[in-house]
């Protein structure tokens, strides 16, 4: 009897120790927080997407650009090639065989398209979704563009909207401010100012009167939205900063090899990394977004990580969803729903329970 009793006590002690020492960030499996609603199948890799009230816009790498109805996932049209006029007004055919970025400007029904094979940025009107897009405008500068911010300029007959993005010239890289100076098709612009940056800009976000630029392995720049685009501070996070969002006084960073990182920006001129908190996520951290007190992060092979930001300096992992052998690219909240792109599923829309 004593011989059997001692092993039982040992088992109970081991079970109790395992339960009490489990990691606080282990995901909850019940209830599920993310409920799948729709799947938007893509032909190519969905490297970039944007969302509006009615449509989903996708850059599909070798298969060009596609536009879906956001409510039922029906394909509206696919753009794999088009024609544009060069400076001599000659028609030039362009094949979108490396569609890498797409941005929709709903106030103007206007699309910006990046084909990184030839480092060109194009624009086109999207006022009539049923009319196939056959012509585009070529904006005459070169860069590998991964993100764009814009601002509509109201009640101005000369300047219609402003554009902030990365430009490359003579192997130098710049964060540049342009103002478009004519109405549709919005192809004429004048440069306002720029600052040189050390690397390609992977993400641009605007918070209050500042721009935050994530430049991979180089740095994160905080730039004032003033006439000179003054550099306010630079941050050197662990790993490679690919995606940024601000919540309350904190900057959240998806850092490729270092997972989720947090930076206190309560003093904008002196950002402080919270080195005591860093989540080494499963897979390489690629993209993040925030809605209310939820933070969603996708990693290359680790899927979707959903965090609770009730304690902003200590995010709590609520759930992780992953499809085996898939590769994830981008995450985006829109109107309270979560959109996620991945190699095998295309774009998937989730609701929050």
Image (cartoon, grey):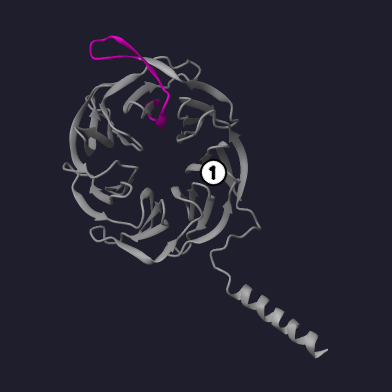
Look at the picture and state if 86 lies above or below 63.
above
Q: Quadrant of residue 191?
A: top left
Asked if residue 333 can be seen in this view, the reply is no
What is the x, y in percent for residue 50? 45, 35
For disc 1, the marked residue is 337
Look at the picture and state if 106 lies above or below 9.
above
Q: Give the range drawn in magenta.
A: 84-110
| Residue at image location 39% in from the left, 52% down from the top | 255
252 relative position to 31: left or right: left
The single residue placed furthest to the front in the displayed view is 3
Depth check: give the residue in front, 108 or 224. 224
| Residue at image location 67% in from the left, 75% down from the top | 15
296 relative position to 89: left or right: right
Q: In which quarter of the image is residue 8?
A: bottom right
Q: Classify mark 1: helix, strand or loop.
A: strand
What is the x, y in percent for residue 263? 34, 60
Q: Residue 104 colored magenta?
A: yes
What is the x, y in percent for residue 161? 28, 30
> What count of labels does the image hold?
1
């Amino acid at each position: 009897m004593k011989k059997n009793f001692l092993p039982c006590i040992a088992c109970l002690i081991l079970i109790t120790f395992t339960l009490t020492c489990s990691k606080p960030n282990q995901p909850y499996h019940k209830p599920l927080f993310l409920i799948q609603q729709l799947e938007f199948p893509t032909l190519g890799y969905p490297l970039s997407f944007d969302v509006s009230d009615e449509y989903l816009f996708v850059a599909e790498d070798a298969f060009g650009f596609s536009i879906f109805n956001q409510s039922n996932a029906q394909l509206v049209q696919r753009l794999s090639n088009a024609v544009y006029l060069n400076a001599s007004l000659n028609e030039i055919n362009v094949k979108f065989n490396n569609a890498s970025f797409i941005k929709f400007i709903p106030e103007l029904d206007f699309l910006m398209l990046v084909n990184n094979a030839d480092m060109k940025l194009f624009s086109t009107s999207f006022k009539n979704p049923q009319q196939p897009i056959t012509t585009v405008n070529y904006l005459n500068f070169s860069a590998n563009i991964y993100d764009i911010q814009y601002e509509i300029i109201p009640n101005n007959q000369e300047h219609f909207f402003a554009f902030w993005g990365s430009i490359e010239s003579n192997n130098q890289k710049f964060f540049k401010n342009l103002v478009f100076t004519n109405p549709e098709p919005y192809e004429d612009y004048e440069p306002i100012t720029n600052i040189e940056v050390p690397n390609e800009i992977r993400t641009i976000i605007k918070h209050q009167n500042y721009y935050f630029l994530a430049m991979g392995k180089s740095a994160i720049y905080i730039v004032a939205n003033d006439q000179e685009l003054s550099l306010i501070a630079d941050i050197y996070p662990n790993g490679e900063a690919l995606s940024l969002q601000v919540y309350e006084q904190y900057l959240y960073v998806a850092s490729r090899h270092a997972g989720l990182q947090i930076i206190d920006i309560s003093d904008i001129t002196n950002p402080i990394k919270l080195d005591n908190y860093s989540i080494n996520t499963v897979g390489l951290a690629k993209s993040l977004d925030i809605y209310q007190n939820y933070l969603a992060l996708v990693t290359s092979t680790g899927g979707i990580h959903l965090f609770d930001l009730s304690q902003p300096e200590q995010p709590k992992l609520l759930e992780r969803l992953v499809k085996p052998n898939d590769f994830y690219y981008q995450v985006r909240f829109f109107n309270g729903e979560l959109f996620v792109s991945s190699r095998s599923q295309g774009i998937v829309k989730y609701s929050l329970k």
